[in-house]
Amino acid sequence: MSSFDEREKSFEKKYAHDQELQFKVSARRNKYIGQWAAKILGYNEEKEKEYIQSVIKADFAEAGDEDVFRKIKLDLKDYNISDDDIRNKMNEKMELAKKDFS
């Protein structure tokens, strides 16, 4: 029975590690997408930092990426940036964030 318990604990640790890594990657992606949007919005360095934090916090509204997408879309509504452009940029920044942790 102890080998089964050890195996179960091993799986639990791996799951916890994978979840933590996914959280870190998503937060990094949100940082990158926030930097991208802040540049479009013409924010200075201080305002950019605040904006990045607001993008990261937006991700806690619901599961998945739609909350971040909606925030970016709303914030960039006056800049003629399509939904596809935003989604493509989010995907690009996700790949960059994954590389940061590999």
Image: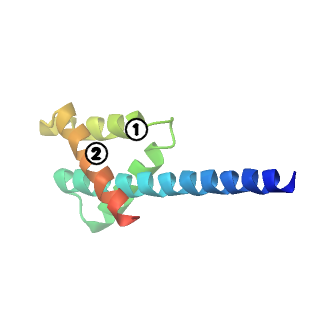
Vertical relation: 16 (above or below) 80: below
Instruction: Give the residue type that dot 2 points to.
Output: Met
Q: Are marks 2 and 1 in contact (CB under 8 Å)?
A: yes
Task: List x then y, in percent, for residue 69.
Answer: 33, 37
Vertical relation: 6 (above or below) 85: below
Mark 1 closeness class: few <14, some 14–19, many ≥20 residues within 10 Å:
some
- Residue that carries the numbered disc 1 in the rendered image: 65
- The reply to whether residue 33 is visible in this rendering is no
Task: List x then y, in percent, for residue 58.
Answer: 44, 43
Quarter where residue 38 is shown: bottom left
Which residue does the image show at 28% across and 45% down from the upper left?
90
Which residue does the image show at 34% across and 34% down from the upper left?
70
Q: Nearer the viewer, residue 99 or 8?
A: 8
For the C terminus, give its image quadrant: bottom left
Q: Residue 27 vs residue 9: left or right?
A: left
Q: Name the residue at the left extreme.
A: 80
Badge 2 or badge 1: first in the primary sequence:
1
Which residue does the image show at 39% across and 33% down from the upper left?
66
Instruction: Give the residue type that dot 1 points to.
Output: Asp
Task: List x then y, in percent, for residue 99.
Answer: 33, 62
Quarter where residue 97 is shown: bottom left
Which residue does the image show at 51% across and 43% down from the upper left?
60
Q: Secondary structure at mark 2?
A: helix
- Residue that carries the numbered disc 2 in the rendered image: 90
Mark 2 closeness class: few <14, some 14–19, many ≥20 residues within 10 Å:
many
